[in-house]
Amino acid sequence: MFTNPLRESTQNEIELIDVDGDALWALVLYCYTGCVELQEDSVETLLATACLLQLNPVIKACCQFLVKQLHPSNCLGIRRFADTQGCSELVEYAHAYITKNFMEVTKNQEFLLLSANEVAKLLESEDLNVPSEETIFHALVTWLEHDPENRSKDASKLLGLVKLPLLSPAFIADNIESNEMFKDQRMVQELVIEALKYHLLPERRPLLQTGRTKPRKATVGTLLVVGGMAFEDATSIDAFSLRDNAWRSLAAMSSRRYVFATVVFDKKLIVAGGMNDRKALNTVECLDFSTLTWSTLPSMNVRRYGLGVAVLGGLLYAVGGHDGRCFFNAVERWDPGTGHWSSICSMSVQRAGVGVAVLNDKLYAVGGINISSCLNTVECYDPHTNKWTPCAPMSKRRGWVGVGVMNGCLYALGGDSVSNSNDSRFDCVERYDPKTDTWTMVAPMSVPRSEVGVCVLGDRLMAVGGYDGQQYFTLVEAYDPHLNEWEPVAPLKPGRAGPCVVVKNLTNNM
């Protein structure tokens, strides 16, 4: 202004429009003293004036001050103000605070006073920290009902940002079709039909994928890695949050055991079998997520490691394994009603290092090893007939294979083709379609590995850790079935080979 031939350069007196005198005086003093006092009731005015005068140290100090002032009752206003001033870092901090504390934010007056566009920007976020999509729907209804006369015109557009296919049909019937706010709106009816199709036609879900069928990061549950094999003791239980893309320590196993099996059953983590330094185990323990305490369940009838476990029809199944001398085809199941383990029909072949999963109310046993070789055979158990039936074999022999179920198909990941060989691991992945009884190769993992932990987290298949004969991997990858691509996520610490499970609604304070 003063070093260029602008009009102000020749004036003796210049009026600063819309500048607070107290804030300007404080900044003049800062220029001479290097000090400025920040107060809660004047920091925004001071920040706006500092932005006008481009006093970057003061801008930074004011933003840091406001970050510490963030609260569910003021965070929306602070984000809006930071945006008007071009303070991008403060905008990011405030937005992260809003998404993390969304449930508390929606209970405050600032949320009710948002414009429709501002509400839309919130509902579009995949990072909202909510237990379920129902929370998002109720927040929207609260906002609409605060001023129904003026906001009803935006109801259908904003409802389109709620992931209706992830709500139950009963919830949709009770809360949308009966709500006067959404009646007689064509777009609402189209959204409801889309959601109900998703529920009524599960076999067509791969073709019905949209942004509304992709769960938000906080609603997919928490991935757990439980113990496992490692170069150092691996007794920790680590939890992965997709929303934070980070791991944290959750608990520890009550004792050391290796080559065991885990599953979530009745909101508890079950750890079954395995081995310690001396012998195979038949003991079973469970971790209560609400108290993070361990308790003992009745022991299996057979000591076994390298087994697989799964839950089917409210019963816990233990499949195959090895006791140090013999490979097993024996299968037993635990009934929580009676508290007893009982033997059922044995598999057709002995299998240790077997992949076990439940698909279409049947129990599948995939690959594994026995006394003679690694296996490519697959069989499934029907609890109604108490019989095992052979399925189409895989194209690869896979011992210590990782198995997961997604979108009505069975996936077999990695594994070992020659027992005890260091150069026989696979990176290839096969998918089994029970409707056609066929296996198809899909995109391979980035590295060959056996003993990889496999589970579904949201709409991704997770491959966790593993072993290549020389190292235990920290690598974690996520498979997108629609793009047929793997992408890395936050790695483990430390590397390990072992099982992983998904736990729904693991509370934030755990």
Image (cartoon, rainbow, N blue to C red):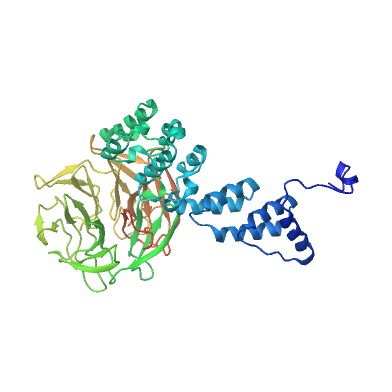
How far across and how far down the image is residue 174, in percent?
A: 27, 38
- 179 to 69, vertically: above or below: above
Nearer to us in this view, 306 or 213: 213
Left or right relative to 192: residue 61: right
For the point 27% across and 32% down, the residue is: 201
Left or right relative to 479: residue 316: left
For the point 37% across and 42% down, the residue is: 137
**Quarter where residue 57 is shown:** bottom right
Q: Is residue 254 visible?
A: yes
- 16 to 213, vertically: above or below: below
Left or right relative to 89: residue 435: left
How far across and how far down the image is residue 302, in percent?
A: 14, 64
Nearer to us in this view, 93 or 208: 93
**Quarter where residue 203 is shown:** top left
- 49 to 281, vertically: above or below: above
Work out which quarter of the rendered image holds the C terminus and state it: bottom left
- 51 to 163, vertically: above or below: below
For the point 89% across and 46% down, the residue is: 11
Q: How many labels does the image show?
A: 0
Q: Can residue 489 be seen in this view?
A: no
How far across and how far down the image is residue 476, in percent?
A: 41, 54
How far across and how far down the image is residue 382, in percent?
A: 13, 45
